[in-house]
Amino acid sequence: MAVHADRVLVAHASTGGSTKAVAEFVATWLRIQGLQVDLRGLDERPDPGDYDAVVLGSAVRNGALLPAAEDFVWRNARAPRTAPGAGMAVQPRHQPVAARACRILPP
């Protein structure tokens, strides 16, 4: 089933720049698909309610998403869930898979 979304937020929390680079790639790919995309750092506190879809990216440090990403999820947990969304977690190869990153998502 195809999802129609005209305006997409690609939001990221990055420390070393890798997550931002992945977010830039995703934003470029979505633009090639004909979508209007805003690429924003989570430090800008973007409002997902202004968009038809959201892609959230975060670096993973010590088995957890960055605090800005966790804050974004919890701050918007009670918002209506009519918009499609996707997420990405970028972590160094030497760190174990982040189980806590999955647990922070609200039910």
Image (cartoon, rainbow, N blue to C red):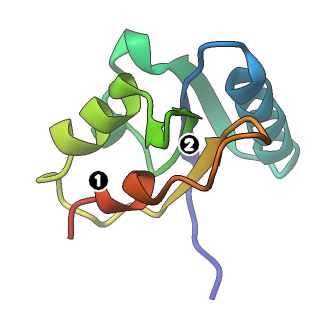
- Report how far apart the C-alphas of labels 2 and 1 lie in the structure: 23 Å
Q: Where's the N terminus, which quadrant? A: bottom right
Residue under label 2: 8
Q: Where's the C terminus, which quadrant? A: bottom left
Position in image of residue 46 (x %, y %): 36, 23
What's the residue at 77%, 46% (across, down)? Answer: 30
Mark 2: give few (<14), some (14-19) or many (20+) Cα within 10 Å.
many
Mark 1: give few (<14), some (14-19) or many (20+) Cα within 10 Å.
some
Relative to 12, 79 lies left or right? left
Please tell me in which quadrant of the rendered image residue 68 appears. Answer: top left
Q: Which mark is residue 104?
A: 1
Position in image of residue 42 (x %, y %): 43, 20
What's the residue at 61%, 45% (across, down)? Answer: 89
51 in relation to 66, above or below: below
Please tell me in which quadrant of the rendered image residue 7 appears. Answer: top right
Disc 2 or 1, which lies upstream in sequence?
A: 2
Relative to 6, 50 lies left or right? left
Amino acid tagged 1:
Ile
Disc 1 element? loop
Position in image of residue 77 (x %, y %): 18, 51
Question: Is residue 64 or residue 105 the one in the foreground?
Answer: 64
29 in relation to 87, above or below: above
